Image (spheres, grey):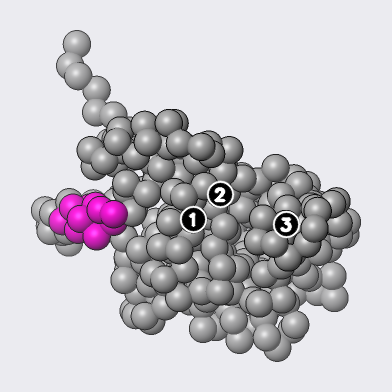
Amino acid sequence: MKDKIPFNKPPYTGLEDEYVLEAIRGDKISGDGPYGKRCQEWFQNKLGVSKTLLTPSCTAALEMAAILVDIQPGDEVIMPSFTFVSTANAFVLRGAKIVFVDVRPDTMNIDERKIEAAITYKTKAIVPVHYAGVGCEMDCIMDIAERHDLYVIEDAAQGMMSTYKGQALGAIGHLGAFSFHETKNYTSGGEGGLLIVNDKQFLERAEVIREKGTNRSQFFRGMVDKYQWVDVGSSYLPSELQAAYLCAQLQNAEKINAARLKAWDKYFSELRDLEASGLIQLPTLSEGCKHNAHMFYLKVANLEERSAL
């Protein structure tokens, strides 16, 4: 039996062992320790945003976003029909009705030309998903949101190190979310995520929600004498071990990105003749977008052809 090609190989730099062991032997492994703070500072500097908060998963980051924009039962949230279940679940858990909008056949991102027709008086937010690390048409989406007084929450699970017209994906809408699942370009040891806060009105409450609805973060900064329960929330802190693993990857972020892009470019170059013959369609990159080679996909005519291939 021939060896099977693995679905994915999580990135590994060689520093993970050292950093995780150091975290294990440290004084704090429950979260927001030295490695957690280093990661969050790295992202804040890299993305140029007000605040970033590590989470146990991208799903958790999206759930926090749903709480922050105050999704209530009956509210409508617009998102692409082609996405992962977490994008919808985060808002369904708050009682929202999901309004799906079809995707563009070229980029597989939400068709920005169809969003406005889906808006009603119940619409609360738009959730664009940057498929395969290629940015949605964010200028158009942000314009629609501003005119209709809607929040924009970027599901940038696949978008770390990608940009749209020079802006980092996840750092354009009011809120954004990254994933560090093992299938992503960067991982924090199998699972992990990041909430990106771009709108300053959410800064303080994001910390509270992440700390089970308490002002514990303010307590550790000496802002209050004791912390108490002040809002809704849940346990959205990852362990220091996850942060240590991720920190090793961030130190090599450019190297990892370059290797992926090299492989992606190789596929694209070698498969262009098949596309020219009409046998397959290759990925499309939007103008002004810099992608991160998250995945390389092929499109064929139908299910039967795909199964045969």
From the viewer's perspective, is 49 left or right of 266? Answer: right
Residue 91, x across and y down, in percent? 73, 54
Instruction: State which quarter of the image contains the C terminus.
Output: top left
The disc, 3 or 2, on the residue closer to the chain's N-terminal end is 2
How crowded pointer 3 is (Cα within 10 Å; few <14, some 14-19, many 20+) is rated as some
Instruction: Name which residue type carries label 3.
Output: Phe
Instruction: Name which residue type carries label 2.
Output: Asp
Determine whether the residue tagged by mark 2 lies in a helix, strand or loop.
loop
Main secondary structure of the magenta stretch: helix
Could you tell me which residue is drawn at 43 percent across and 56 percent down?
Answer: 38
Q: Is residue 206 above or below residue 148?
A: above
The disc, 3 or 1, on the residue closer to the chain's N-terminal end is 1
Instruction: Name which residue type carries label 1.
Output: Lys
Q: Which residues are magenta?
A: 251-262
Disc number for residue 37: 1
* Foreground: disc 3 or disc 2: 3
User: Gap between marks 3 and 2, in whole Å?
Assistant: 13 Å
Determine whether the residue tagged by mark 1 lies in a helix, strand or loop.
helix
Disc number for residue 32: 2
Residue 38 part of the magenta-drawn span: no
List the residue tagged with mark 3.
219
